Amino acid sequence: MANNRRGLPEINAGSMADIAFLLLIFFLVTTTMDVDTGISRKLPPMPEEEQLEDDSQIKAKNIYVVLINANNQLLVEGELMDISQLKEGAKRFIDNNGLDPNLSDNPQKAIISLQNDRGTEYKTYIRVQNELAAAYNEIRNDISLKKYGKKYTNLSKVKQKEIRKMYPQKISEAEPKNIGGDS
Amino acid sequence: MSRFKKNGKKKIGAISTASLPDIVFMLLFFFMVTTVMRETTLFVSVVTPKATEIKKLEKKSLVSYIYIGEPIKRLQASYGTSSRIQLNDAFATVDEIQEFIAAEREARDEKEIPYMTASIKADESVKMGIVTDVKQELRKANALKINYSTRKGTY
């Protein structure tokens, strides 16, 4: 065997780098490094036909009504509000604990009801969702700093669950309907 | 130039490039492993809105993407500029979403179905009407885990 092979010339490996570079550039170009991020939400299941919409059991003061019209304006609890104030408003509502008779009894009962028009811009909708999520996150962060001296995201799973139970994120979206403005 | 050579006390040999292929191969393997090929060609232009309270989407294989936006410039002549939905590699209507979700479920393992997420990649300028329609269809298809795709940023 060895005798037969002796005559074969050695393969030049000098171009190996070139080939590897070629492949490398191909993968560099096709690669997408972007990580998908977003706001996660859970949709409510479709209502059963016999099940009637019954909001009357929930006291009106425990619902924080946020309406967005086709002109991207906010109506919060019957008053026009700028989007930049929404977070503070929501925080005050959630963490009221019966102080103000017009706001929620306690955080467990607090529900944020969000309604939008068909003509609302998606950008505004996401911003509102973001502000509401931010309100909850800030409240959870505050309480976990107070209780455990750590940020909410740094807590263990069990403790996170405990805090989530104290401040459940209840954002309800009504069945779609037109709420004024051109769509 | 020649003066430099004369003055230089030590002669520096040529740098060996023998390990260059190894380095390149290392990089190559890194990119090969991390790469995710683009699966779909976008026919709609999507600039996702900005948000701060974002979460990473995990398990990419369990995510179904729904794109909503204006058709790209090249296709605007034939499709107009009104917002459209894109599923996989084609424009779709709202009614096709249920089929799409069913097909996506078919492709996955039965155990993984509850963890499937529908990611709505909508352009920031689209109207909520079309997004609401999509959400209603998702509810009908019982695909309740959704994710509004956003990028990181503040207003």
Image (cartoon, rainbow, N blue to C red):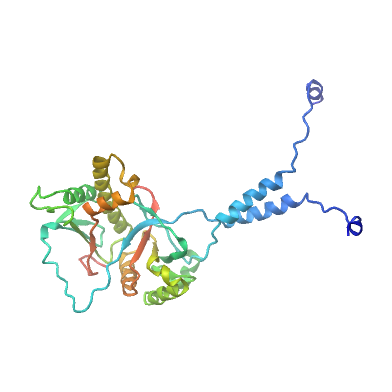
Q: Residue at x 18, y 53 (%)?
A: A107
Residue A41, by quadrant, is bottom left
Residue B149: horizontal and vertical position, in percent? 39, 59
Residue B88: horizontal and vertical position, in percent? 47, 70
A108 relative to B68 in the view: left or right: left
Looking at this view, name the residue that lies furthest to the bottom: A50
Seen in the picture, residue A35 relative to B83 is either above or below; the reply is above
B71 relative to A86 in the view: left or right: right
Looking at this view, name the residue that lies furthest to the left: A101
Residue B72: horizontal and vertical position, in percent? 47, 64
> Residue A157 versus residue B100: which sits nearer the camera?
A157
> Residue B67 versus residue A13: which sits nearer the camera?
A13
Q: Residue at x 26, y 53 (%)?
A: A164
Residue B4: horizontal and vertical position, in percent? 78, 23
Asked if one can make out residue A167 in the rendered structure from this viewpoint, the answer is no
Q: Residue at x 39, y 61 (%)?
A: B123
Q: Residue at x 47, y 73 (%)?
A: B107
Asked if one can make out residue B13 in the rendered structure from this viewpoint, the answer is yes
Residue B135, by quadrant, is bottom left
> Residue B59 versus residue B84: which sits nearer the camera?
B59
Quarter of the picture containing the N terminus of chain B is top right
> Residue A50 versus residue B138: which sits nearer the camera?
A50
A156 relative to A77 in the view: left or right: right
